[in-house]
């Protein structure tokens, strides 16, 4: 729905949350493909000092590792019960690569193209505006604002 409305969708994910399993990550991949956001970013779970997750998980946090990995999206000082740090880094990389490979496949590109065409057919005024802008008959909003600012 966001794509058809011309809204660009970006999803931020966290892997390695307490109790998360490989099955949970597989389910996340399935949901991503249904939602089909334009971009995904993935971080590794990292409890921060002063948060409820820090208080709850303090026994599983490697204090010596905090200086290196305190605010990292790649690693965590938290010792996960199902995955090593290396496995979490690999899961993070694979999740992004797999999604991007799927998203950029010919089939998905065609699906997005036909979604846009259908949107413009259902909303002909939007389609006409988009077409005029694409061929240069209607200036882009940024150019109009810059021109107006220059005249003032």
Image: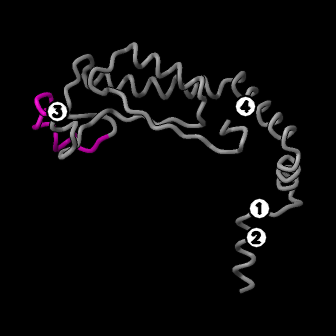
Q: Which mark is residue 27?
A: none
Picture coordinates of residue 43, whole percent (x, y): 37, 35
The residue under label 4 is 112
Quarter that holds the C terminus: bottom right
Picture coordinates of residue 78, whole percent (x, y): 20, 31
Report the residue at 29% width, 41% height from top: 72
Answer left or right for 100 relative to 56: right
What range of the chain is rendered magenta?
Answer: 58-72
Q: Is residue 108 magenta?
A: no
In contact (CB < 8 Å): disc 1 and disc 2: yes
Quarter that holds the N terminus: top right
Point out the tag, 2 or 3, that comes first from the N-terminus: 3
Helix, strand or loop for the magenta stretch, by majority: helix
Point out the tag, 2 or 4, that comes first from the N-terminus: 4
The residue under label 2 is 144
SS for dot 3: helix
Q: Which mark is residue 56?
A: 3
User: Which residue is nearer to you in this view: 9 or 71?
Assistant: 9
Up-down relation of residue 37 to residue 98 (above or below) = below
Point out the tag, 3 or 1, that comes first from the N-terminus: 3
Report the residue at 62% width, 27% height from top: 103
Foreground mark, 3 or 4, reads: 3
Number of numbered discs visible in the structure rendering: 4
Q: Residues within 10 Å of mark 2 (few under 14, many from 20)?
A: few
- What's the CA distance linking mark 1 and mark 4? 23 Å
- What's the CA distance linking mark 2 and mark 3? 53 Å
User: Which residue is nearer to you in this view: 79 or 93?
Assistant: 79
Q: Residues within 10 Å of mark 1 (few under 14, many from 20)?
A: few
The residue under label 1 is 140
SS for dot 4: helix
């Amino acid at each position: 729905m966001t794509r058809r409305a011309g809204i660009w969708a970006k999803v931020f994910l966290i892997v390695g949350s307490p109790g998360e399993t490989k099955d949970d990550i597989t389910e996340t991949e399935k949901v991503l493909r249904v939602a089909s956001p334009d971009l995904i970013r993935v971080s590794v779970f990292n409890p921060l000092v002063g948060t409820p997750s820090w208080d709850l998980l303090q026994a599983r946090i490697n204090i010596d590792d905090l200086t290196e990995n305190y605010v990292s999206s790649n690693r965590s000082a938290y010792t996960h019960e199902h995955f090593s740090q290396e496995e979490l880094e690999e899961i993070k990389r694979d999740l992004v690569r797999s999604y991007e490979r799927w998203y950029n496949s010919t089939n998905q590109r065609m699906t997005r193209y036909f979604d846009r065409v259908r949107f413009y057919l259902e909303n002909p005024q939007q389609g006409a505006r988009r077409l005029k802008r694409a061929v240069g008959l209607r200036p882009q909003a940024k150019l109009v604002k810059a021109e107006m600012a220059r005249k003032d």
